[in-house]
Amino acid sequence: MKIEQQGEFTKAQEMLKKLAQKEVITDEEKNELLYEIERLDRIKLDFDVIPEEMIKQLKEDIPDVTKEDMEKWMQDGSLEYRIIDGQTFFFGVAKRNLYRMSKEAKERRNKAFEEMKKEIPQDKTSEKFMNYIKEVIEEGKKSKTHYVCPKRFKVDYTLTVNPDVVPEGEMIHCWLLFPREIEKQKDIKVIGSKPENYKIAPIDYLQKTIYFEQPADEKGNSTVFNVVYEYTGYGYFNPIDPSTIKPYDESSEVYKKFTAEQKPHLTFTPELKKLAKDIVGDEKNPYLKAQKIYDWICKNITYTTAIEYSTIPNISEYCFENKRGDCGIQAMLFIALCRISGVPAKWESGWSFQPEDENMHDWAEFYVEPYGWLLADPSKGYMKSDNPEIKNFNFGNTDAYRLIANDDYGMELFPPKKFFRTEPVDFQRGEVEWKGGNLYFDKWKWKMKVEEITQ
C-alpha cells in the first residue's frame, strides 16, 4: 500500500475502515481490509524505539557514535526503522541486528568492548551436542531405518493471559502447541494440564494443537493455561549418494502439491524465478539442486531477529530483497526456490531443545527419491568441523532435540479460530481469543520449561 510506504499509518487505517464499511464488498474482502488495519497496529508494536532511545542504546556499545552514523546505517538497511505518522521508530531489537548486518558497526563495538573482554571458557554444551551428532552419524550408518539415538523430553508450557484484558467470567479459548505423532517423534503422553479438560487436534491437522477453554479469572488476576507432556524424538542420518537419486513421478500427489505455489509466502515472483535459475543453472539432479539452494542461502542470507511474520506480505520475497531473516524466513526462501526448481519442499517447525539453546525454531524439508523427506535447516547452516558428514549434517539429517508441531504453514487450527490469528503463519507460542476478539502477544505471556529425561 503506497500510503503505508509513505508512513501515513493513521490515514491508511481510516481509508481501510471506510472501505470495509461499504455494502458492495464481500465478507472475504471485508476481512482482508480489517486484517490490514490490524497489521498496521502490529507493525507499531514491533517498531517502538524512538531515535533518542536508539542513540542512547548505541552509545552503550560505541561511545563515540553519532547521529550521522545512525543515519548512515539506516540508509544502508543495517538499522531497521519505519516512518509512522511522520515520526521515526526503530525495531525493538534493531541494535542487535545492526551488529549482524554492518561489519563497521560490529568492529567499532568490539573495539569499545576490548577492555571488558574476558577469557571465554570452553563451551561444554557445544561439545556435548557435537558428540551427540557424531553418535547419530555412527548409529545411522548401521540402522536400516536410520532413526537412531532417541531422546525423551518433558515439556511444561504455560500461557498466562494478563489481568482484566477479558472481563471476569467470560470464556477464553486457548490453543497450545503439541507434538505430532510421526516417525521421528513418538510415544507422546499428556502428564497434566490446567484446566483438566482439553482437545487434541486429529492426526490430519498439520499444525498440531491442544485446545483449552476456561472463564477469565476474577478482576485483578491472570488466567493461566498449562500443559505438561512427554515425548521421544529421534536423530536421523542417512548418507546420500547423489548418483542413486531417481526421477520424480510428476503425476504424483507429492510432486504436484509440493512444487506448487502456496500464496502469499510461496509466490513464484519473476525475481525468485530468476534467482532459482541463477543458483541451480543446468543441474538436473534434485538432491544437488536443493544442495545448491541451501548453500546459496547459507552464504548470502544474514541471520537476524525478525519482525512478526504477520506483518510481512510475502516472506520468501522479503528474505531475498533484504538478504536477512531468522530461521523461518530463511526456510521459506529455501522452500520457494526448491519448488520453483522442481524439487518438492515444505515447512516444518516447532522448538529446538539443543542444550542451552532452547528456542522456537523453523526449518524445511525437501523430497527426493528413493530417500523420501529430508531436513534442510539453512539458518543453522554448516557445523564447525573438518569432517564433511558433521559439517553438512543440517542438510539431509536431523537431531532428536526438536519438538515438531507443524508440517505446513498457515493451516486451520482445531477447533477453528473465530478471529484473526496472532501468528497466521507459524504456530509455536499459542493462540488466544474470547467473544470480543483475538488476544495479541501484548495481552499474554508464555513460558516453556524443558527437561531431558534419562531413559
Image: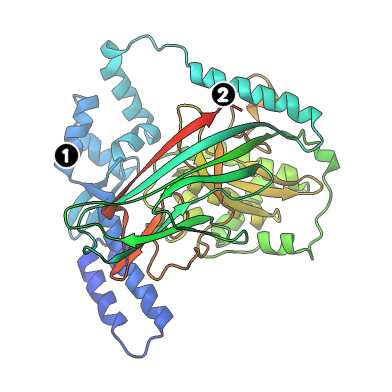
Question: Between residues 353 and 343, which one lies in front from this camera angle?
Answer: 353
Q: Quadrant of residue 141?
A: top right
In this picture, residue 62 sits left or right of residue 96: left
Q: Secondary structure at mark 2?
A: helix
**Marks 1/2: CA–CA distance:** 39 Å
Q: Which residue is label 2 attached to?
A: 129
Question: Between residues 445 and 197, which one lies in front from this camera angle?
Answer: 197
Q: Are marks 1 and 2 in contact (CB under 8 Å)?
A: no
In the rendering, at what x and y percent does residue 317 appear? Answer: 49, 55
Q: Earlier in the sequence, mark 1 or mark 2?
A: 1
Residue flagged by tag 1: what amino acid is it?
Answer: Glu
Task: Say whether residue 380 is visible.
Answer: no
Looking at the image, which residue is at 62% across and 24% down? 132
Q: Which residue is label 1 attached to?
A: 53
In this picture, residue 280 sits left or right of residue 434: right
Looking at the image, which residue is at 62% across and 33% down? 399
Q: Residue furthest left?
A: 52
Q: Secondary structure at mark 1?
A: helix
Is the residue 31 above or below the residue 209 in the image?
below
